Amino acid sequence: MEVTGSRRKSFDQTEINWDKLDKTKFYVVGAGIFTGLTVALYPISVIKTRMQVATNNAAKDSAFSVVRGLVRNNGVPGLYRGFGTVITGAVPARIIFLTALETTKVAAFKMVEPFKLSEPVQAAIANGVAGMLASLCSQSVFVPIDIVSQRLMVQGYSGHASYNGGLDVARKVLKSEGIRGLYRGFSLSVLTYSPSSAVWWASYGSSQRFIWSKLLDNGTEHGGPAPSQGKIVSVQAAGGIIAGATASSITTPLDTIKTRLQVMGHDKRPTARQVVKQLIAEDGWTGFYRGLGPRFVSMSAWGTSMILAYEYLKRLCSVNE
């Protein structure tokens, strides 16, 4: 009991809960930090999306071939197609996500506490539930933004149409399909991002607790002062890498199907079953893992960068009692 209590105290020293945050500062500073991360990592999303929707000979292109083609034809701005649309929608979507995540996580921890589970299992359940519900809450804003930005990412590539910006995409989709067109693939998006978010946050929470438990078992920090910031950041970064690797490996097939559904033109709109058959016909079962490399890099890079920025933001916005 003494060791368990000591561990819980050490865990508490590394985490900042929702009730300890200055909410205004959290949202304002967070918008700036996550916008910076989006600028840095956005090209990986463009490459991943193009690889997933490529047809015929273009389907054989490597990530490096996609980059060379974009830069050769459009220069560096080609790597940021659809960026303006993403940034416009990212702020409200992120506010919804983070608010739901933090409030749900607190409630979920209270619900699992009576079961006397191990720290990693408690963290996995609470973080997983919070990640899934947060994703569900943000999908209503995220899906239309995702559809518009993805069409801009692949315009002119492998037979896809060209547009004059995000508003032109939205106008044409609404004209041909109505409001439902902006929510094409919504159910698959929920089935992709909600489990992905649940797996990511569950993996992050449990791996971080597991690492700290091993440090404590080895005598590190046991009965001593709070862990150093360097040690906390290292454990959080390791948790982000593990979470990104786990989530990308599990959810890439659904993401590939969803992306194809969302970017196909109205005149040749396929069903999910047709997309599955086409992928199998073109590449066999490996077709579902198109863009796995960029997606793995994207989720690992995004996950590690995001969680370090997120944890830094929480420390920056914490309210001292």
Image: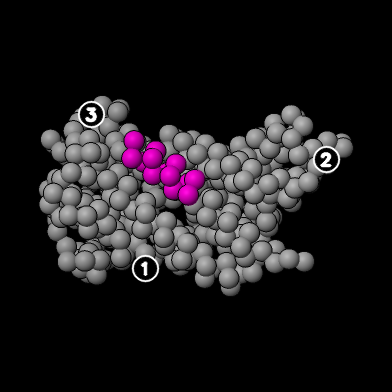
Q: Which residue is mark 1?
A: 88
Task: Tell me the mark number nearer the camera, choosing from 1 and 2.
Answer: 2
Q: Provide the residue span drawn in magenta.
A: 293-305
Q: Which of 100/273 is in front?
A: 100
* Quadrant occupied by the C terminus: bottom right
Residue 265 appears left or right of 136:
left
Please name the amino acid that badge 2 sits on: Gly
Dot 1: element: helix
Callout 3 touching callout 1 (CB < 8 Å): no
Callout 2 touching callout 3 (CB < 8 Å): no
Residue 21 part of the magenta segment: no
Please name the amino acid that badge 3 sits on: Asp
Residue 24 appears left or right of 155:
right
Please name the amino acid that badge 1 sits on: Thr
Residue 41 appears left or right of 197:
left
**Residue in view at x 72 percent, y 39 percent:** 119
Is residue 63 placed above or below 36 in the rendered structure? above
Task: Tell me the mark number nearer the camera, choosing from 2 and 3.
Answer: 2
Q: What's the magenta bit mostly, secondary-structure-wise?
A: helix
Labels in figure, total:
3
Q: Earlier in the sequence, mark 1 or mark 2?
A: 1
* Quadrant occupied by the N terminus: top right
C-alpha separation, residue under disc 2 versus residue under disc 3: 56 Å
Asked if one can make out residue 216 in the rendered structure from this viewpoint, the answer is: yes
C-alpha separation, residue under disc 3 versus residue under disc 1: 36 Å
Q: Which residue is mark 2?
A: 223
Is residue 120 placed above or below 312 in the rendered structure? above
Q: Which mark is residue 283?
A: 3
Dot 3: element: helix
Q: Which of 218/283 is in front?
A: 218
Task: Tell me the mark number nearer the camera, choosing from 3 and 1.
Answer: 1
